[in-house]
Image: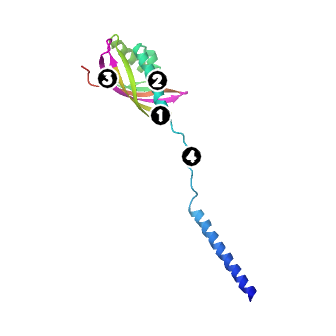
Amino acid sequence: MKFFKLATLGLAISIFTMGCNSSVAEKAAVEPAATVEPVVAKADMVSIKAEIQGLESDWAASDNARDANAIAGFYSDDAISLSNNAPMTVGKAAILKETEESLAKRAQGETVSYNVLEVFGDGNTVTEIGTAISKNASGKVVRTGKYMAIWEKRDGKYICIRDIYNSDAVVK
């Protein structure tokens, strides 16, 4: 009789243990294991903004030197430019021609500067928002404007693939 009680107790413990284990196994099957999202490095937008500002400063230097070829060099071959009060310009060759025409019309001694206000993107493709200020030979502001440019990193350097520029009201 004592043996029968011990056997029954052992059987009850075994059934209880298997029941608990089944619940854990069933629960694991129903609830997926916690997923770990991959770590993605975020672009350092502060240093990208500084890099784009460097490009814009070089662009202004080329603009002020009236070097249309250097300005066109900031664009990709497949770039599209949306200039103020002008049709869409498609491709580097067309942008070069438009730049040459624009520079020929500019007053002697007029200079331009560009100021990057904001950049955003993933580091490979960056959208820039900025302002432009044009001054005459005596340093008086003659025109202000704003622009947006999309830069893409190709062969390790940023190149402009799209831009749009609009002048503000005439400065008096």
Q: Position of 63 compared to 10: left or right?
A: left
Is disc 4 in contact with disc 3, using a CB cutoff of under 8 Å?
A: no
Of labels 3 and 1, earlier in sequence is 1
Q: Amino acid at mark 4?
A: Pro
Residue placed furthest toward the right: 3
Indicate the quadrant where residue 87 lies: top left
The numbered mark at residue 144 is 3
Tell me, yes or no, whether the highlighted magenta stretch contains residue 44: no
Label 1 CA crowd tier, 10 Å (few <14, some 14–19, many 20+): some
In this view, the residue in front, 125 or 40, is 40
Residue lying at 36% horizontally and 27% vertically, measured from the top left: 147
Residue placed furthest toward the top: 108
Label 3 to label 2, Cα distance in Å?
20 Å
Q: Mark 4 — residue?
A: 38
The numbered mark at residue 45 is 1
- Helix, strand or loop at label 1? It is helix
Of labels 2 and 4, earlier in sequence is 4
Label 1 to label 2, Cα distance in Å?
14 Å
Q: Amino acid at mark 2?
A: Gly
- Helix, strand or loop at label 3? It is strand
Image coordinates for residue 29, horizontal then vertical, percent: 59, 63
Residue placed furthest toward the bottom: 1
Image coordinates for residue 41, horizontal then vertical, percent: 54, 39
Q: Nearer the viewer, mark 2 or mark 4?
A: 2
Q: Is residue 83 above or below residue 13?
A: above
Is disc 3 in contact with disc 1, using a CB cutoff of under 8 Å?
A: no
Q: Amino acid at mark 3?
A: Thr
